[in-house]
Image (cartoon, helix red, strand yellow):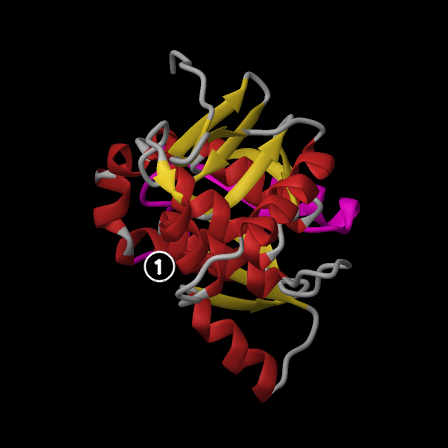
Amino acid sequence: MSSNLIINKEFDVLIVEDEPILAMAIKLKLKKFGLNVSNIASSPNDAILYAQNNYPDLAIVDINLNSSKTGIEVANYLWKNFNIPIIFLTSYYNDKILSEAMEAEPYAYLLKPCRNEELKVAINTAMHKHQYFFKNKKVFKNKENDFVYLKENIKYNKTTCELFIDDNIIKLTKNEKKLFYILTKEAGKVINFDTIFNFIWREDVYDLSKLRSLIYRLKNKLGFNPFENLYEEGYRVNVIKKNI
């Protein structure tokens, strides 16, 4: 395969890089190759949110992001949830970083600044190995079905156990995630107190005050109560219908 040829130009590339000048330099290189850079994400959350809503075909990710989350964590999320192929960029590496990076099963690992030919070869290799995904991209675009809408601007992803308000990820505690999981598994259905309590706390005898306290804290965090208490029956999540 010639490194001077991009074998497939009909796909979108996401760049995850927190250095604006470097990100723009990579974008210009890709445009010269005839590729479409669909977005530049400067933070892990921006990258994850963009991927959830747009499903890019390829992600070029800087390992060393200036954030609490690393580029490796972002890449792991993109690969495990959406099977987006990864090309890593880094200014340095050692055995430990390389070992951690391999968990995201990257198709290439490039040292900055990378040459045009190296980048072309990496992209061609990624597309060649990931050909099945590119041909069946529509399968992954049905992920909107994983969302439960609590309000027009508030949604919960049943697959990733993440809550979004105005497309911003809201941090949930371990027990809050469990509560959302059990109540959205069959959204709108009443789940009895025993089932909820056993799932969250793994205890045979439930303490209703413990559950109410969890819901109260969640209500304060969100500014509204997404759950409805049906007397002597249990709880259910209140959802709205939304045309996608």
Report the residue that reaches farthest toward the bottom.
95
Residue under circle 1? 125
Q: Quadrant of the N terminus?
A: bottom left
The C terminus, quarter of image: top left
Task: Give whichever of 30, 102 is nearer the camera.
Answer: 102
Q: Quadrant of residue 183?
A: top left
Residue in the foreground of this view, choosing between 226 and 207: 207
Q: Residue at x 70, y 70 (%)?
A: 91
Residue 118 left/right relative to 111: left
Magenta segment: does it hold 22? yes
Counting from the top left corner in percent of width and height, residue 226 is at 55, 29
Q: Residue at x 38, y 47 (%)?
A: 82
The span picked out in magenta is 1-28
Residue 31 appearing in the image: no
Q: Per the image, is 44 magenta?
A: no
In the displayed structure, would residue 222 be above or below residue 96? above
Residue at 51%, 69% (x, y): give it. 109
